[in-house]
Image (tube, grey):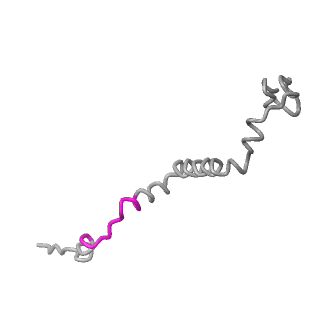
Amino acid sequence: MAEVRKNTASGARKGKTKKRSQWVSVMYRFRKNKLAMVGFVLFLILVFVAVAAPLLANYEEDAIRQVVKERFQTPNAEHWFGTDQYGRD
């Protein structure tokens, strides 16, 4: 009869394998998914734009200000879609 030997090296590893934490496992799978990474990058861009919004546009000057002389203009080079009753673009 053939003698069957147990592989002691793999048997020892089974009990001593270091398990990943759930967070590390989720991040590993997330990084492997290319579509998830594209979505994450787009999300970071949106967060950056939202945080930097006061630097990008002056709300008081651009959104609230009324310019009476520019009311109801038709589309032109300065106002591509014309202006409304408050002179806003």
Q: In which quarter of the image is residue 28?
A: bottom left
| Residue 47 left/right relative to 25 | right
Magenta segment: does it hold 63? no
Task: Identify the image quadrant of the C terminus.
Answer: top right
Rendered position, 3 above or below 71: below
Closer to the camera in the image, 58 or 66: 66
Above or below, 72 against 22 in this view is above
Q: What stretch is highlighted in magenta?
A: 14-25
Image position, residue 20 (x, y; %) = 36, 65
| Residue 70 placement, left or right of 31 | right
| Vertical position of residue 46 compared to residue 26: above or below | above
**Residue 77 appears left or right of 35:** right
Q: Which residue is drawn at 86% across and 24% down?
A: 73
Q: In this view, does 38 lie to the left or right of 10?
A: right
Residue occupying image coordinates x 84% and y 25%: 71
Residue 63, percent across and down? 74, 36
Q: How many marks on residues?
A: 0
